Amino acid sequence: MRYRLLTLALWVVIAAGLGPLAMKLTDVQDNDSLGSLPAAAEATRAAARAEAAFPEPDALVAVAVYVRESGLTAADRAKVDADRAAFAANAQGGLVPEPAPAADGQALLLTFPVTGDVAPIRQRLAEQTPDGLRTALTGSAAAEDDLGEAFSGLDLTLLLATVGAVALLLLLTYRSPVLWLIPLLTAGIASQCAGGIVYLLVRHTGLTVDLQSQNIMTILSIGVGVDYALLLISRYREELRRHENRHTAMAVALRRSFPAICASAITVALGLLCLLAADLPATRGLGPVGAIAVVTTLAAMTTLLPALLVLLGRWIFWPFVPRAGAPASASWSSRVARLVGDHARPVWLATAAVLAALTIGIGHLSIGLPADETFTKEVGSITGQRLIERHYPGGTLAPAVITATAGTATEVADAARRVEGVAAVGAPARSADGRWARIEATLASEPTSPEAVRTLERLRTAVHSVPSSDALVGGDTATEADGDAVTSRDNRVVVPLVLAVVLLVLIVLLRALVAPLVLLASVVLSYAAALGAAGLILDAIGHPRLWSAVPLQTFLFIVALGVDYTIFLMTRAREETARLGHHRGVLHALTVTGGVVTSAGVVLAATFAALTVLPMVPSVQIGVIVSVGVLIDTLLVRSLLVPAVTLHIGPRVWWPAARRGPVADADADGSEQPDRVAGAYR
């Protein structure tokens, strides 16, 4: 009892110290990393050169759009002139340039750097508008304002959605008015402590955290925390039926569930740390933040949770209090085990066929999320972009920016004009020191479209070929193209690394080679099926074009988190086969872990599904893909495919382990008798 109280006291001190720091984490977010590229990328080098050679005031740009499809009227032009005069009060330098007319005479643009809030500009733009004239505010200033408004209060919304979903599922799982609070409270404490640790690392080590990694940190802490709690509490409930003393029951439960929980946490944490090998900053930054969340949660669930459970006693299971000597109730997992045991080969073949069929849905997905589809609903800045695209060349707001040596400026500009897909090339501007020239090339296509990326590649080839030009091409389209290249490189490097780490952990845990290979193949198939099934859903809701980092991040979560459930199953199977023999041991493991692992999978899927409340399409895509993947892994892969394949292969699945000694007798119902173990696999 004394040690339990000391554990609680220690966690109170830790939470009191780190909790307030977690509240400050939003203040140190660096969301620039969400769209940034490695320093070696040409777009990054071009931006750095342009900033050094052509220093400009650090101000966001507002673009006021005026459109009348039948042609602008005198009243419309008067409105533009009046707004231009009014906007001067919010423009940097107090000056708004002349409006830029569209070639079709149906639109005008006012473009100017702003100081302060854009709210007065929006308000003025909406006032005294002639009937039939459409107006909108876009540009970087409007986009940033829309982003801030979209995420206002969403940290609390995400937390409430996550906690609400998990609380409901725990109530259904435990059917207890009290027990569900304990794992949820512990996971919440772990989440706050992880946030405090991340805050300290951001302040003192240069670690980067953005809104995406902070949101996923919350999801991971609660999701994996409740998973580990379900596994521990399930084993604790088993042991309470065997031991009168609850301290003894917890000691046995913790000793026997800790290896699986620890292996799960190590797998997920190491998998996340594999993201450090990525070049894309948004992907790389997620690794350590997520790993901290998982390790902190592991510590809480294996120290604080057991202490709380033991101190509170058996009554927390009310009204279904486990009593010593009481038999375990039958469950649906025993029926699944009988099905798998009687028809192992047909079951795994049919399950694999279903998973393979689901992969067809991948054809509905594509890589490359256009800028105007970043939000789940249209905001003012997106409306403005679309109006501009109808009446101006697609790249008007985001031209490709070429910087080259001043002596070759004319040749570079001429080379750019000859490129197919370039709508216009501006006159070269020389830097103050006379070394460099800046040339803007307007592309005919929307800046982040595949057509614009192909045009950019031709443009780069053309200007690079000009002798002694040292030309670099930057801008939004260059960022998109370089981002695609970096993402492809990250996929080639990180995916094999994650698979190697998972395989190594499984080999060490199971002390076998065949079983880990089977499990690894199953989670890869599970990921492909999840991507296909999610592809059908995302296509149906209108978001089939994936943000470039989504496939890698979802691969990591589905593989690392999905293998958790097979770890829970196979570690128990290895324990039981030593006692009951291979066939009965695997089926007994499936029976006793089926309910808890299924509950854990549903809870984890619900926590990731909470990401869909966020107004950003990448968050929705991650939430849908991971949720579907976890459910597929829980309901099909872990419940049917893995145990059926394990039975079909037979004891060779544990190779090169060799059995020694006779298999101990067991009760007819396969119940555990730990004192009669006479054989083991090694």
Image (cartoon, rainbow, N blue to C red):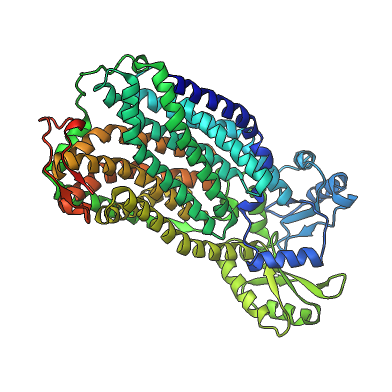
Q: Is residue 110 above or below residue 313?
A: below
Q: How many marks?
A: 0
Q: Residue at x 62, y 29 (%)?
A: 17
Answer with the quarter of the image where residue 369 lies: bottom right
- Left or right? Give the position of 529 relative to 352: right
Query: Quick check: can you spot residue 416?
Result: yes
Say which of 232 and 130 sits in front. 232
Locate residue 526, reporting x and y percent.
Answer: 33, 50
Q: Which residue is painted at 65% across and 61% down in the image?
A: 476
Residue 99 as seen in the image, left or right of residue 23: right
Question: Percent from the top left, x then y, of residue 570?
Answer: 27, 44
38 relative to 602 in the view: left or right = right
Out of 665 and 458, give the one closest to the viewer: 665
In which quadrant is the N terminus drawn?
Answer: top left
Q: Nearer the viewer, residue 479 or 601?
A: 601
Residue sitting at the far right: 94
202 and 416: which is toward the camera: 202
> In the rendering, at what x and y percent does residue 124 appear?
79, 40
Q: Evaluate whether residue 134 shows in this view.
A: no
State the residue at coordinates (57%, 58%): 280
Q: Quadrant of residue 329?
A: top left
Q: Residue 181 at what x, y percent from top left?
A: 44, 22
Q: Residue at x 29, y 56 (%)?
A: 517
